Image (cartoon, grey):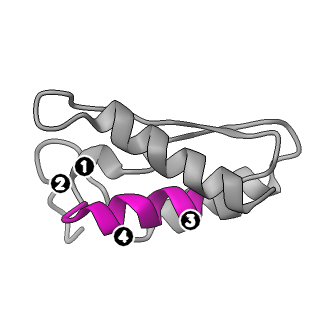
Amino acid sequence: MGGELPLGEIYLPSDPPRMLKVIRQTPKPCLAYKILAAGRRIESPAQVRQCFETAFSTIKPSDAVIVGMYRQLTDQVHENASIVREISSRSR
C-alpha cells in the first residue's frame, strides 16, 4: 500500500478470491465472512447478487456465510434472503 495505511477498514479487490481459495482448501467447515465487504465495494443490487453467487459457487457444501445488514436503508434481510433462496433453488 505504498508504505501508508489508510484509516478504517480496507477491502481490496483481491481479498474475496484469496479468502474463498483458503476456505475451499480447508478440510473443516468454514464461515465466509464479509462477502459483501461491509457494502464498501457494492454499487448495485446486481453486485450484491454476484457476491452471493460467487461465494456459494466457491465454498464447500459444509460451509456457511455471515452477512451483515443495515436495515435503515432497505429491507436487506428480505432482499438477501430472496437472493439466497433463488441461488439455492437453482442448485438442487
Mark 3 lies on residue: 54
From mark 1 to mark 4, how far is it between C-alphas? 13 Å
How far across and down, in percent of the image, does residue 38 sit? 28, 43
Q: Is residue 81 left or right of residue 27?
A: left
Q: Establish if 76 lies above or below 26.
A: above
State the quadrant of the C terminus: bottom right
Mark 1 lies on residue: 39
Q: Establish if 7 lies above or below 52.
A: above
Please report the residue visible at 41 percent of the width from the left and 42 percent of the height from the top: 80
How far across and down, in percent of the image, does residue 59 sit? 71, 54
For badge 3, the amino acid type reads Thr
Q: Is residue 32 left or right of residue 90?
A: left
SS for callout 3: helix
Can residue 52 be found in the magenta stretch? Answer: yes
From mark 3 to mark 2, how far is it between C-alphas? 28 Å
Q: Is residue 69 left or right of residue 74?
A: right
* Front-lying residue, 53 or 19: 53
Q: Are marks 1 and 2 in contact (CB under 8 Å)?
A: no
Give whichever of discs 1 and 3 has the lower sequence position: 1
From mark 4 to mark 3, how far is it between C-alphas? 13 Å
Range covered by the magenta-colored residues: 42-55
Judge depth for marks 1 and 4 and give the one in front.
Answer: 1
Mark 2 lies on residue: 5
Give whichever of discs 1 and 4 has the lower sequence position: 4
Q: Residues within 10 Å of mark 4 (few under 14, many from 20)?
A: few
Judge depth for marks 3 and 2 and give the one in front.
Answer: 3
Give whichever of discs 2 and 4 has the lower sequence position: 2
Please report the residue visible at 48 percent of the width from the left and 51 percent of the height from the top: 83
